[in-house]
Image: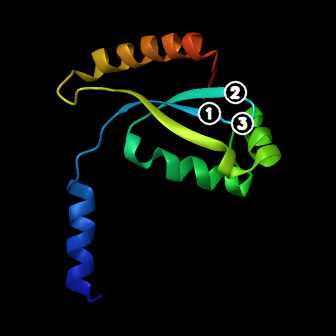
Amino acid sequence: MNREERKALVAAYKERKTVTGLYAVECTATGAHWAGRAPDISTIWNRLEFTLGQGLHRHSGLQAAWHAHGGHAFRLRILETVDDDMPSFAAERLLRERLAHWCAELNAERL
């Protein structure tokens, strides 16, 4: 890959549209759930898989379950996304409220 191609790919990545949203991680071996929010829902699984695989995730319960059951026992589910034209203060409040709802609904721990 030459320099111009690389610059074009980097520019395209920076210009891509991100989607903010809520997600849940489920351990299929135990049925346990963890719920969280992400500013870019399309990249959250890569981040989770990396930090958990390295043993670096900040949530000790999720990290322990990952070590006990392995990565193949986990799946990610997108719960909701937020309109990008919503004002940031309204989106923040909505995300907080909906995350609390999903934690109660799934009996999930908050990430």
Q: Give the labeled residue for mark 2.
A: 32
Quadrant including the N terminus: bottom left
Residue furthest to the left in view is 85
Q: Dot 2, how many residues are within 10 Å of its Cα: few (below 14), some (14-19), or many (20+)?
A: some
Q: Amino acid at mark 2?
A: Ala
Distance (Cα) linking label 3 and label 1: 10 Å
Tell me if label 2 and label 1 are in contact, CB under 8 Å: yes
Residue 76 location, x and y as percent? 52, 39
From the viewer's side, name the closer residue of 35 and 70: 70
Residue furthest to the bottom in view is 2
Secondary structure of the residue carrying tag 2 is loop
Quick check: 94 above or below 63? above
Secondary structure of the residue carrying tag 3 is helix
From the viewer's side, name the closer residue of 81 and 39: 81
Res. 111 image quadrant: top right
- Looking at marks 2 and 3 on the same chain, the residue that comes earlier in the sequence is marked by 2
Q: Amino acid at mark 3?
A: Leu
Q: Give the labeled residue for mark 3.
A: 62
Determine whether, in the image, residue 101 is placed left or right of residue 70. Answer: left
Distance (Cα) linking label 2 and label 3: 9 Å
Q: Nearer the viewer, mark 3 or mark 1?
A: 1
Res. 88 image quadrant: top left
